Image: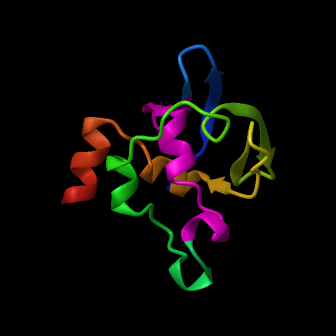
Amino acid sequence: MQSLSPTKIDAKKAERILVVEWNDGHASAFPFGLLRAGCPCVECRGGHDKMRSDPEPSVFNQELPESSATNLADLSLVGSYGLNIQWNDGHHHGIYQWDYLRKLCPCEQCRFEKQK
């Protein structure tokens, strides 16, 4: 079985979305606010005891306004397993591993799969 990985990553700053094309043919469009709400770092999660491999379901209902906390400053790959996002407010601690990032996909198809 082929492991999940992106074939293309495109930060569309004017549209405030991160588009990831995956090696299984799926494309995910992540609003910057969702990425920040779903930041997987220990600080954003509220401590080591709250770390999970899946995003908290509540992140899909949070609406974060445009601010320095939701404006993407930079992206960098972390090895072959994830993506680090630096935000304009200086936050840069979250490593979005590929499986986690895919589970954060807000599209209807992925949300339906999560509810099964």
Q: Position of residue 25 (x, y in %)?
A: 45, 31
Residue 64 sits above or below residue 29 on the image: below
Report if residue 39 lies within the magenta region: yes
| Res. 2 in view | no
Q: Position of residue 27 (x, y in %)?
A: 45, 29
Q: How many numbered discs?
A: 0
Name the residue nearer the viewer: 84 or 110: 84
Q: Position of residue 105 (x, y in %)?
A: 42, 43
Name the residue nearer the viewer: 106 or 89: 89
Q: Residue at x 56, y 69 (%)?
A: 45
Q: Residue at x 42, y 33 (%)?
A: 26
Q: Residue at x 44, y 49 (%)?
A: 104
Instruction: Specify the segment rendered in magenta.
Output: 19-45
Q: Residue at x 67, y 35 (%)?
A: 68
Name the residue nearer the viewer: 59 or 77: 59
Q: Position of residue 1 (x, y in %)?
A: 49, 56
Colour logic: rainbow
Tell me the quarter of the image containing the C terminus: bottom left
